[in-house]
Amino acid sequence: MFKYLSQRILLAILTLIIIVLVVYLSVAIFAENPFVRQLTVSAGDKKALTESQIRDLFEKSKAFHLTPANLEFAEHKKDWIYFKVSPFVRLGYWFKDIFNKEYPFGNVFDQNVFSGANAKNIPDLFFKYIKFSIIITLPSFIISAILGIALGIVAGYKRGTTFDIFVNFFSLVFIALPSFIVAPIFISILLNFNIPPIFQNPSNEEVVKAMGWGKIILSWLPPIFIIVLGSLSGYISYARNQVVTVLTSNYVLIAKSKGLSRSEIFFKYVLRNISIPLAALIIPSYIGLLSGGIIIETYWQVPGTSKVLSQAFPTGEINLIMFSTFFFTTLGLFTTILVDVVYTILDPRIKYGTTSKYNLRTWFTATLERNKQFKELNELAKGGN
C-alpha cells in the first residue's frame, strides 16, 4: 500500500508540474505587461506621465521580472517597453516565490487588490473569498448527491415506468441546459416576486444587523437551487445506469431464483456494487462545483473565487491565476488518490496491484541486446558473402 501511494503521489506531483508549466507559459506569453499598458493608455489619453512616474513603472516592471534586470532607465527611457524577460526565466522566479515568507506564490501587480479585501498576500486573499464559494457549493453538493442518487436508484428499479420516464426527461433537460441559460430565467422569476438576486454577505456586520440571519440564509437559497438543478442530473443518470446494470447481471438473477427478498438483494448486491463507481463520481465532483461556479457567483454577486479570477484575467495578474490553478489542481489530483483508497475500504477484494515482471528498464536492456545481436548477424552475413 505504501509503495502504491508513493507512486501515485509522485505521479500527481509530476502531473501538477506539467499543468503549472503549460498554464504559466500560456499566460506569460500572451498576457500584456500591465505597467507598459498603463504607460501606453496614459499616452493614448493624452495624459502624459512625468519622468518620475515613468521611472516608477519601469522599476515595478523590473521588480516583477517583466523587464530585464540589467536595463538602466537612463539609457532606455523610451524603448524599455520593448524589452521582455523570457517566460521560462519568469517561471523560474515564480517557483522561487512559492517559498517567499512575506508573499508566498508572488505578489500582485495592483496593490488595490489586497487593500480592497484587507489581505496580506495571495493565499490570504484567495481563502478570504473561497469561504463564500463553499457557502453555496457545499449544501448544493450534499443535496444533489443524496437526492440524485436516491432518485437514480428508484428510477433504476422502476425502469420503463412513468416515474423512470419523468426522471430521465428531467435529467436530460437540465444536462442540456447550461447554468448561464437557467440562471437568468430563474432571476427573472425572482424579480417578479420582488426578490433581488443578491447574495448577502454574512461577514458584513451591518448586513447582519439590518437583515438578520434568516433573510441572509434565504438569499443563499436561489444560487444553491440552481447549482442543485445542474448537478442533480449527473447523479441521477449515473446512479440509474449502475442500478440497471447490476439488476440485469447474472448474480442478481441467481439471487432472485434463490428466493432472496428485494431488500436483501439491494443491500447484499446492488448497494455494494454501485457504491464503488458512485464513490469515484461523488468525491471528485465537489472539486468541480467549487472551481466551476463562476457563472452562478457572477449572477448572484457572490464574493467567491470567481471574484479573484475576474480581477486576475483582465489585469494579467499571473500570480493570482497560478495560485488558483495550483490550488484546484492539487486538490483534484489528491482527490483521485483518496478515491483509490476509498475503493479498498468499500471492497477489500480490490488490491493495489502487484509488481509486473515487465518494466521500462527490462524493456530497454532487452532492446539494446536485440539490436546488438542483429548487428552481429548482419556483419556475419556480409562476411559470408
Image (cartoon, rainbow, N blue to C red):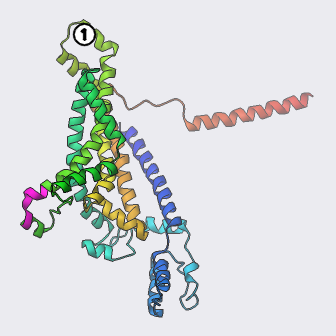
Q: Is residue 260 shown left or right of residue 337?
A: left
The location of residue 181, given as percent across then percent down, is 33, 49
Q: Position of residue 243 (x, y in %)?
A: 29, 24
Residue 271 seen anywhere in this rendered image of the structure: no
* Residues in magenta, as a range: 210-217
Question: On the rendered structure, is 372 left or right of 188?
Answer: right
The image shows residue 262, relative to residue 120, as above or below, that is: above
Residue 8 at x, y = what percent? 41, 42
- Taking the magenta stretch, the answer to whether it contains residue 363 is no
Residue 180 spot, x, y in % from top left: 33, 51
Q: Residue at x 33, y 35 (%)?
A: 172
Which part of the image, by quadrant, shows the N terminus? top left
User: For numbered disc 1, what is the local secondary structure?
Assistant: helix
**Within the image, what quadrant is residue 168 found in?**
top left
| Residue 211 falls inside the magenta stretch | yes
Residue nearer the viewer, 250 or 333: 250
List the residue tagged with mark 1: 256
Name which residue type carries label 1: Lys
Q: Give me the residue at 29% from left, 11% from top.
A: 253
